Image: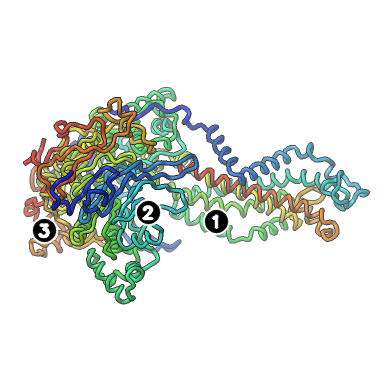
Amino acid sequence: MSESGLERTTETRLLPASNHPGAGDGLLSPLLSVERLEVQFRAKHGAVRAVNGVTFQVSSGEMLGLVGESGSGKSVTSLAIMRLFPRDGSVISMGRVWFDGQDILSIPEPAMRRLRGRDMAIVFQNPMTSLNPTMRVGLQIAEILMVHEGLGRRQAFERSEALLQMVGVPAVHESLAKYAHEFSGGMQQRITIAMALALQPRLLIADEPTTALDVTIQAQVLDLIRERAAETGMAVVLITHNLGVAAGLTQRIAVMYAGLLVEVGETRSIFASPRHPYTVGLLGSLPRADYHRVKLTPIPGMPPVQVEEPKGCPFAPRCARQISVCSTETPALRSMGRQVAKPSRAVPNTCSHLVACHNPVPTEETPLMPLGSRRD
Amino acid sequence: MSGIQSEPSGALLAVRNLVVQFSSTRGFLVRRHVSTVRAVDDISFELQQGEIICLVGESGCGKTTTGRAIVALERPVSGSIVFKGLELVGLGARQSHRVTRHIQMVFQDPYSSLNPRMTVGASVAEPLVIHRVGSPEDRRQRVGELLDAVGLHPESSAQLPHQFSGGQRQRIALARALALNPELLILDEPTSALDVSIQAQILNLLADLREKYSLTYLFISHDLAIVRWLGDRVVVMYLGRIMEVAPSDDLFQTPLHPYTVALLSALPVPDPTVEDQRKRIVLEGEVPSAANIPVGCRFAGRCWLWRELGSPEQCQEMEPELSCVAKDHLVACHYSGEAAVRPFGLDPSVD
Amino acid sequence: MDLTSVRPPDLAMIDTPYRRLASTLGGLIRNPLSAIGLSLVVLFVVIAVFAPQVAPQDPIALDPVHRLLPPGIHHLFGTDENGRDILSRVIVGTRLSLLGAAGILMIGVVIGVPIGLLAGYAGKWIDEILMRVTDIFLSFPSLVFAIAVAATLGPSIRNAVIATGVVWWPWYARLIRGEVLKLKHQSFVEGAKILGAGSLRIMFLHILRNSLTPLIVQVSLDFGYAVLTLASLSFLGLGAQPPTPEWGEMISAGQSYYLTQWWYVTFPGLTILVAVMAFNLLGDGLREVLSLGRAR
């Protein structure tokens, strides 16, 4: 985790929680750093846990995939980062979320609102949650610009037009005067992306942005996100249950299960040599279009209905590699070292592969997925 | 299959020139016709005993409507559906009752496919009750067997559906569909609402059940990866029409219709190495409305090949027929030979 | 096979009608407002059932000596112009009011539910015709219609109940039709069709059974309103006839005394108020408890 200083400039790290940004060693801090994040929802009978201590970092220009099944806590994590919970105390977030040196969980609401509008943006699965059905699309985008940038009406509309053009909405001028429901799902999602990008945020959280869309439209929207990220250098956290989408877009992947981060690493490394039994099981559950496989090897059992207080590994009941310590001690993320010799994409080369498992799958036992090299 | 017009070829199910139309009307007494949508527009295909045929396509392509027409949930405007030599279209209530025993359907949404007020046992036994099969004691035993066959504990039969997860409910729905020993199961995206790890369990179960009960499946899906894994033969639909029919491996290795090529190219593959090497064809625009189908080839407006070939007029004037271009491989494209260049980078490797 | 995925059912989790009733009651009691509503309704029902035993005095026998006495130890609610104990008359009137309201709702449900079910399920022209008929009935002001019926058939509590019931059902027809339209395209209903289930089986077993919750809630909310309507008709002289004790009829009789003998109209009036409120609280509570149970 310590290599030559020059290469650290674009570094993405996943360090133990104690090394909060800027601490000690004078490393350049990542844009977003989530440390031991816990989220609980207050319910009638005690608190319901959703996230149980999640730690990860994202640098500018990086695209991180947050992957997990329903109930894994991936969406709640994103809401906590944006601090989009009701402020009536019904949701408790603990831990730290550093964004550009500020602890998001503790700054006052007005400052947070500014940050949320300008520096961080989020795109949801259902575009209609972010579009006002009774307001013309043009005004909705222009309003953001008028409020945050103090632009005049005309200027704001000109910029809105340019934004819609950028995200590939056809007949831009006419589209400004339309209502959200007059667009197809794919176009609506493009519009929400335009709104999210209006103020050139430094962090974009995309929460299942293409799940509701058809494959050909999904490809268009993913291309759009990839292109915008490459051009502006913003960091992207892509939340998805679709490992294919994550494989195509991200540089690093963090896998969540039952409110815990179970494996983090470079995308290639995760797919080529997954070490956590859950990740291995997930990959073994996936039918693939690019080659014929005889049998799927699903994970037995079901994910827990509710996230429990961490006592032992939450995956243990479904795990074939369970050992005695698994039921008593929650495993912490440990480095497995680097596993891919040559990084494929612009991945910071000090990135390591971390796994939270007492008995990780040995590298030689993970050929469930063919390595890219194996098929050449 | 080559001769679509050929006489009964021993196919379990033959769909011929099927047209399903939805028209909306307004007004009382004097009904005004508002619009007509051709959800399924003249399609033909056959199912052989024991095979798994997959209908794929994007939303609005008519794949679900086709399945629903086969089980008489939609009334076709024209065309025929022949099951074991018996014409299903226009069948009287009593006879269709007799046929429906042999064709069952499993729906997409596990949360609405079971009556929330009926116990699991009552739901699974309902087909037996309706068709007056066995005594109550026989039925109870059969329910136990069925639940066991789909991997559920027989004692679950006393519980209500809300106590089960999505995957378990799909298992119950399968048990119910199997109660009358049907020959054909129509599976309408049965796993699309489930998580990946649960989806794999259900897919394996489907494969096992097919072996065990020698079933024939009509599997409706938008997920090409599942189609590749499960299907023997694939029917690709676009805007109510069949674009391509081919055995699964053929379709994925040598897709001949430019739409299929684009569909495969857009499909994310869970392998970053493959993803990095692929070249994508990103289709422009969106599926046109089924109320306003373009003249000529309905895909031409979005077709990458059409543009590449310099927008030949033929595509916009004449609708291509579904014709046989290789063994068991049918394509509806004027330039089907040209699409086979496979620039989409789905590396075929058959294990 | 992954039998591991399925645990044997937890016996304590198994739903039985008894358990469901118990959990509904439990939910009602947990909310203070619906608990009040429930206990008042239970109280009213008990009073109605045991009215002759509970009533301290004869509600009909005249006692001119003790006429128009203010509330006191012997007559908690005072007496009327014929010396009858108002408390006893209110108590005995409870039975008539509740029975009458139940009759109205019963007529409404018996006519409305099948019509709504048929209209929603059959659709097309049957739906059009039935719904237009429903609209016609809805456009009748119910009180005016009841007056017309009473005028032709003669005033009596039975005629008042029939007249009100006959204009009451369209609400249930609409409610049930809406539920049917929601349920009709659910997969389990379509699945039953594919199985070859008959229309009656689908309508009653699959659709009606799942529309009962909103119906029960609506009926319990309407109960208070039916009590009120019946009292209004009696007040107008179109329902219960003297000397039958009935809340509305008592207020009607007492209206010439309300300036000087306040208790005469006050206690029957308060009783109506409390009864209507009790049924509303219960209905609201039921809606909350049952819809929560549905979401689960």
The chain under label 3 reads: B
Q: Which mark is residue B305?
A: 3
Say what secondary structure mark 2 lies in: loop
> Across the whole image, how many numbered discs are drawn on residues?
3
Between C149 and B286, the one lying in front of the other is: B286
Looking at the image, residue A147 sits to the left or right of residue C13; the answer is: left
Looking at the image, residue C281 sits to the left or right of residue A260; the answer is: right
Q: Nearer the viewer, mark 2 or mark 1?
A: 2
Q: Nearer the viewer, mark 1 or mark 3?
A: 3
Q: Is residue A76 above or below residue A194?
A: above
Labels 1 and 3 positioned on one and the same chain: no
Residue for badge 2:
A83
Q: Is residue C29 above or below residue C4?
A: below
Within 10 Å of disc 3 (Cα), the crowding (few <14, some 14-19, many 20+) is many
Q: Tell me the distance, in whole angstroms, between the alpha carbons under discs 1 and 3.
A: 58 Å
Q: Please state which amino acid type lies under the numbered disc 3.
A: Leu
